[in-house]
Image (cartoon, rainbow, N blue to C red):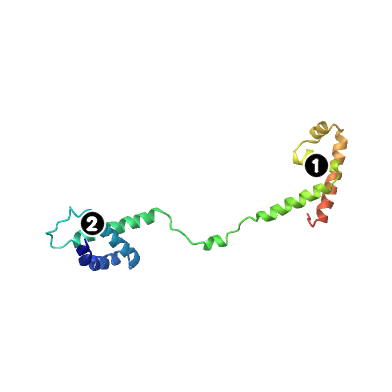
Amino acid sequence: MSALYRQYHRPLLAFVVRLTAGDRQWAEDVVQETMIRAWRSAEQLDPDAASLMPWLATVARRIVIDDRRRRDARPQEQGDGPLEHMPVPDEMEQLLHQVVVSEALKALSPAHREILNETILRDRSVNDAARALGIPVGTVKSRVYYAVRALRVALEERGVTA
């Protein structure tokens, strides 16, 4: 095998460099793979042949073709360039809004917090909230009105507008 390598390495490498459009690293990998296949197929090679170069060149060409097909079958990888400029939702902003709203709700009276919890957070109608709390519908309506006003003031005090 070492005699085969010494004899055919340079001409095979020159041939494969042309096949790989000048990519020397790829060409060296192909030559190495070709030599491994020659070693595995040593019993099939004709030791009396004038040259093993045709067999080696055919194997190398097939390896290059297989490599190209493998690369073409998979989308080409891109660098991180386009991803660097892709807008990513800032979850920190949303978290801060949640904290501010939570603090503003804590600043409300228990009755206002309770009515907003029933009508807005639990998405209940005025009638359903009145039944759940055991208070008249009119009281629910007025508490919702004043609770929303108080919440708006509490949010404005914390720098939230609109």
Quarter of image, res 137: top right
Kindly indicate whether the residue at mark 1 contacts the one at mark 2 (C-beta within 8 angstroms). no
Residue indicated by mark 2: 39
Indicate whether 17 appears above or below 69. below
Secondary structure beneath dot 2 equals helix
Q: Provide residue 82's location: percent of width, then percent of height.
A: 53, 61
For the residue pair 111 and 42, the one nearer the viewer reads as 42
Quarter of image, res 156: bottom right
Quarter of image, res 110: top right
For the residue pair 127 and 11, the one nearer the viewer reads as 11
**Which class describes the residues within 10 Å of circle 1: few (<14), some (14-19), or many (20+)?**
many
Residue 9 bears which disc, if any? none
Q: Is residue 117 left or right of residue 146?
A: left
Query: Which amino acid is tagged 2?
Result: Trp
Query: Which amino acid is tagged 1?
Result: Leu
Residue beneath the point at 83% across and 56% down: 157
Q: Provide residue 118's location: percent of width, then percent of height.
A: 79, 38
Residue 116 bears which disc, if any? 1
Residue beneath the point at 22% across and 66% down: 6
**Which class describes the residues within 10 Å of circle 2: few (<14), some (14-19), or many (20+)?**
some
Which quadrant, please, contains the N terminus?
bottom left
Q: Earlier in the sequence, mark 2 or mark 1?
A: 2
Q: Provide residue 87's location: percent of width, then percent of height.
A: 60, 58
Secondary structure beneath dot 1 equals helix
Q: Provide residue 106's location: percent of width, then percent of height.
A: 81, 47
Residue beneath the point at 34% across and 58% down: 68
Is residue 110 in view from this perspective?
A: yes
